[in-house]
Image (cartoon, coloured by chain):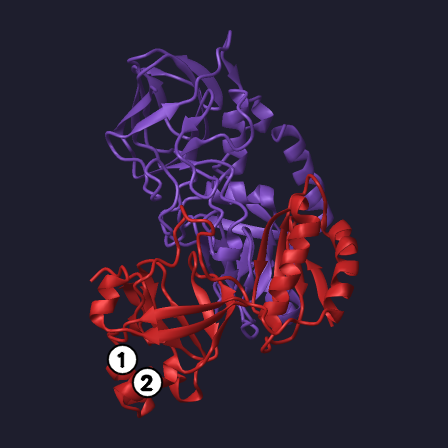
Chain colours: A red, B purple
Amino acid sequence: MIRIEPAGAEALLLVLAEQPDAHLAQRMALLAERIRGELGPLLTDLVPGWTSLLLHYDLTRTDHLQLAEKLKPLLERWIDQPLSERAGRLHEIPICYNGEDLAEVARLCRLDLQQVIELHGAPEYRVGAIGFAPGFAYLGELHPRLLLPRRATPRLAVPAGSLAIAERLTAIYPQRSPGGWHLLGRCPWTLFDATREPPCPLALGDRVRFRAIDERDFISEGGQP
Amino acid sequence: MKGLRVLKPGPLSLLQDGGRHGWQHLGVSPAGPQDLHAAAWANRLLDNPWGTPLLEIALGDVELQAERDTWLAVCGAEMPLSLDGRALPLWSRFPVRAGACLQLGFARSGQRAYLAVAGGFRAVPVLGSVSAQQREGLGGLDGQGSPLQAGDRLLCGNRGVFSHPASVPWPYRPDYRGKPLLRVITGGDAASFDEDQLQGFFAQAWQLSPHSDRMGARLLGEPLQVPARQWSLGVGRGAIQVPPDGQPIILQADHQTMGGYPLLGWLHPLDQSRLAQCPAHQEVRFTPVSVSDAQAELREFYRFFRR
């Protein structure tokens, strides 16, 4: 059951599911694209959450009641829309697994270092949401043997490109920032660059695979030591 | 191009425009002025369009020297303002001559003043906006989100000659001294809070925490009992989050784009300006308002300022 409700005076929340499922992110990406295409000029921002879309609208052009009416036919078409198997671009991201917490993660999960790297590198992940910081993509789902709560004390700063895990998710910190996740390695790429179009290569619903590289490749692929 | 040379930057002076909209889906905060009302008046006095880049000066202690003749306007917090030692009124536009020195002292009431220049300040936009976002390192004079520094030059657009000074009429100038009663549109997860907890939110006087910043205003008071965390969702300015410690946080201009804490409602957009002028430890109270009343008032505000 989809819920449509006002979110303050200038936004409208579409709750699309009670919980995320394997295809929701891709389906939401499809819906977001539709909404942008048909209602774009009325909106200032469109923010996907795990199970919802938040539409920030321009109150001088519309309001939540009018938007809700316009959304109804769009949502009806979306519900019946089949999802193409190939939806969501695939990114292969190089990772140098030399993170500060790798040994600690191995100990807590009762694995050896190589097993942590293999289990982390095995799945094909999905971008379930982007937030926290510019370009910070939440990727799910982690292998069940790697599930750990966040660190008790967050670090004040983790290096840009840090690959980390917490709970069922993995992510790369695009900028140097505070961080409470366990650091497994580094990605040599710049994952958010405001001067690039688009600024962030990952989009909601995209697929991600990790490729293990050594420290020499890390430098040759542009990583900062 | 000439403009204003920064002799004293103040503790936190930031270039702001209408905000960095259209990038929240990538986690980019919209930023923009903390007090839209005062910022809108400063631009309006100079016939600048809505969202023209201006300077947000927190707390004051700023000194600037003009490199050219132009017109300026200052609105917002009550900071002693003078040009070459001669006192000037706030909420007004005034001419400056090349070489003149503008001084803003420490704020006596309110927290932020807005300095606009005829034609606006010039900087290279980042993702469509010059608004400085320090946490994300975007916008501002250097494109990296930095606050103003001594030696910076604020380049000015080439427009605006006025025949006479002008001021904002008295009834439109807020008094930042009183204890504010801020209006809240309840909603979000409000129904998941116990009824007496919601009543408790509106009944008590909250104190503004000194740990508040442009990201969020943190309230201190009798803690609320909080329902379970939600799947993280998009959050906007004014959203009232209640984290597990029961002390609400009201999201401000530099807010994050997503959040998972239960939401009690949203601050009336026009009262966000009033909140932005409250000093640490200020006592604030809340009262409910309907979405439609808030929208009607906001539309009127936009009709006047967003020409």
Say what secondary structure mark 2 lies in. Answer: helix
**Please, which chain is the residue tagged with disc 2 on?**
A
N-terminal-most mark, 1 or 2: 1
Please name the residue that numbered disc 1 is placed on. A102
3D distance between C-alphas at marks 1 and 2: 8 Å
Is there a contact, CB below 8 Å, between mark 1 and mark 2? yes
Q: Is residue B188 visible?
A: no
In the rendering, at what x and y percent does residue B28 appear? Answer: 46, 52
> Is A187 on the left-hand or right-hand side of A84?
left
In the rendering, at what x and y percent does residue A2 appear? Answer: 72, 68
Residue A116: assigned label: 2
In the rendering, at what x and y percent does residue B269 appear? Answer: 59, 45
The amino acid on which the numbered mark 1 sits, given as a three-letter code, is Leu
The amino acid on which the numbered mark 2 sits, given as a three-letter code, is Val
Mark 2 surroundings within 10 Å by alpha-carbon count, few (fewer than 14), some (14 through 19), many (20 or more): many
The answer to which of A68 and B108 lies nearer the viewer is A68
